[in-house]
Amino acid sequence: QVQLEESGGGLVQAGDSLRLSCAASGRTFSGYTMGWFRRAPGKERDFVATISWSGDSTYYADSVKGRFTISRDNAKNTIYLQMNSLKPEDTAVYYCAATSLTYPTDYSGRYAFWGKGTLVTVSS
């Protein structure tokens, strides 16, 4: 079992930056591929970014590529999502998730563990 807790959300203006964190506890964190997903108001949950257990492989949704950066610190059992040049359409609840797969995946169904989410609101 892996417990995940997101933090760092808030209200920002368009063009601002924000860094989300996701702290993990429980089983060995370094063995898990991690991902960020988001759910905008009235929409389905969408993939944002994923990172392999070693951190050397990442993959992004086209909508955030070049603006967001996913990273991890296995010594701190934490992953991050650095979000730059934020847009109003980035407004959503952001969730981190963990999967025992050894490769990054954008398929939410393969993630077994989820945090409760943190709200990011970007005003225009």
Image: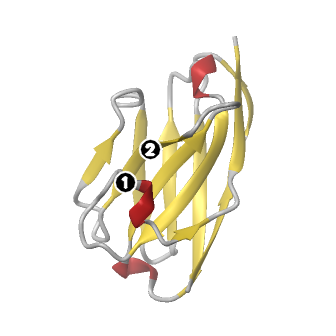
Residue 66 quadrant: top left
Q: Residue at x 45, y 80 (%)?
A: 29
Q: Name the spot of residue 71 as percent of width and height, x first.
A: 40, 55
Q: Name the spot of residue 43 as percent of width and height, x first.
A: 62, 32
Q: Residue at x 37, y 54 (%)?
A: 107
Q: Secondary structure at mark 1?
A: loop
Q: Is residue 74 above or below residue 71?
A: below
Q: Is residue 84 above or below residue 27?
A: above
Q: Earlier in the sequence, mark 1 or mark 2?
A: 2
115 to the left or right of 72: right
Q: Residue at x 58, y 17 (%)?
A: 15
The quarter of the picture where the C terminus appears is top right
Q: Which mark is residue 47?
A: 2
| Amino acid found under the numbered disc labelled 1 | Tyr
Contact, CB < 8 Å: mark 1 with mark 2?
yes
Neighbor class of circle 2 (other Cα within 10 Å; few <14, some 14-19, many 20+) is many
87 to the left or right of 110: right
The quarter of the picture where the N terminus appears is bottom right
Visible residue check, residue 14: yes
Q: Which mark is residue 94?
A: none
Pick the residue in front: 58 or 63. Answer: 63
Q: CA distance from mark 1 to mark 2?
A: 7 Å
Q: Is residue 15 above or below residue 69?
A: above
Q: Name the spot of residue 104 as percent of width and height, x first.
A: 28, 59
Visible residue check, residue 34: no
| Amino acid found under the numbered disc labelled 2 | Phe
Scheme of image coloration = secondary structure
Q: Name the spot of residue 76 as percent of width and height, x first.
A: 51, 74
Q: Is residue 3 above or below residue 19?
A: below
Q: Which residue carries the number 1 mark?
A: 107
9 to the left or right of 25: right
